[in-house]
Amino acid sequence: MPKKRHSASKYLPRGLDILYEDKDILVVDKPAGLLTVGTDNNKTRTAYYMLTDYVRKGNPKSRNRIFIVHRLDQSTSGVLVFAKTEEAKFQLQKEWKDTEKKYIAVVYGQLAKKEDVISSYLAENKAYVVYSTKDTAKGKLAHTAYKVLKESRQFSLLEINLLTGRKNQIRVHLADKGHPVVGDGKYGKSKDGFRRLALHAKSISFNHPVTGRRMTFDAKVPNYFNELVENG
């Protein structure tokens, strides 16, 4: 694992941890609740805004900037990769199909198959809700591999290998199976009383956009996930 860099760390907001940084990429551990990029209602409380300020070291006139490679849902925590040059961004996205992304999730119930791949065509309606469809012209094919790591009477802890990267893919596929992610008010139980979505981007592996070296980064799984299953 490459060594962390701490330069300009005083400009990094609390709660957003840098896992790795060089002149081409910036890898962070995003907390749940923080947007990746801005919306019409929130342009500054985002990982993108905070990290832009970080690379500019507080100087708004600096030409330093970061580029969005992929996104995590606001309610999902874990590994998030940004590029520091446009060339690095394009190269990472060009090879994104070869990027390995693993997640950890806590879902309701016990799955009949302890290891499987969920596949469906995913589409999005006007209300920005993603759903599975049999209409291949309307949806995009998505594959989600999972393995049960631990289970209790109420919950199961899953390791998920995201084989494609569609919006809300994991949440929709698990809800389709009748095992929605705990805390998912959009696709699962509207008010289940849990304080956060139990979905975490655990690790990511990709080829460095300049050196080509295979790199893997891990974000520690919150204790909350194991506690849910152990107490369930």
Image (cartoon, rainbow, N blue to C red):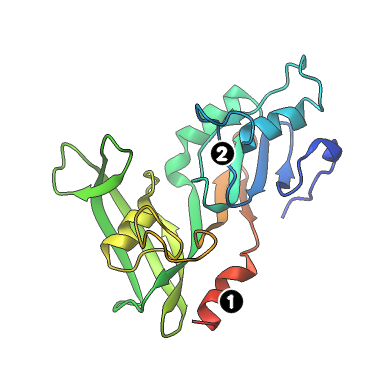
Residue 83 visible in image: no
x then y, percent, for residue 14? 76, 46
On screen, 35 above or below 120? above
The Cα–Cα distance between marks 2 and 1, rounded to whole angstroms, is 27 Å
Q: Which residue is mark 1?
A: 227
Q: Which residue is mark 2?
A: 36
Residue 165: which numbered mark, if any? Answer: none
Residue 166 shows in the view: yes
The percent position of residue 142, horizontal first and vertical second, equals 30, 49
118 sits left or right of 136 in the view: right
What residue sits 73% from the left and 21% below the top? 64
Which type of secondary structure does the marked residue at label 1 adopt? helix
* Residue displayed at 56% across by 70% down: 225
The 10 Å Cα crowd at callout 2, few under 14, some 14 to 19, many 20 or more, is many
Dot 2 lies on which element?
loop
Residue 128 lies left or right of residue 32; in this view the side is left
Of the image marks 2 and 1, the number of the one nearer the N terminus: 2
At label 2, the amino acid type is: Thr
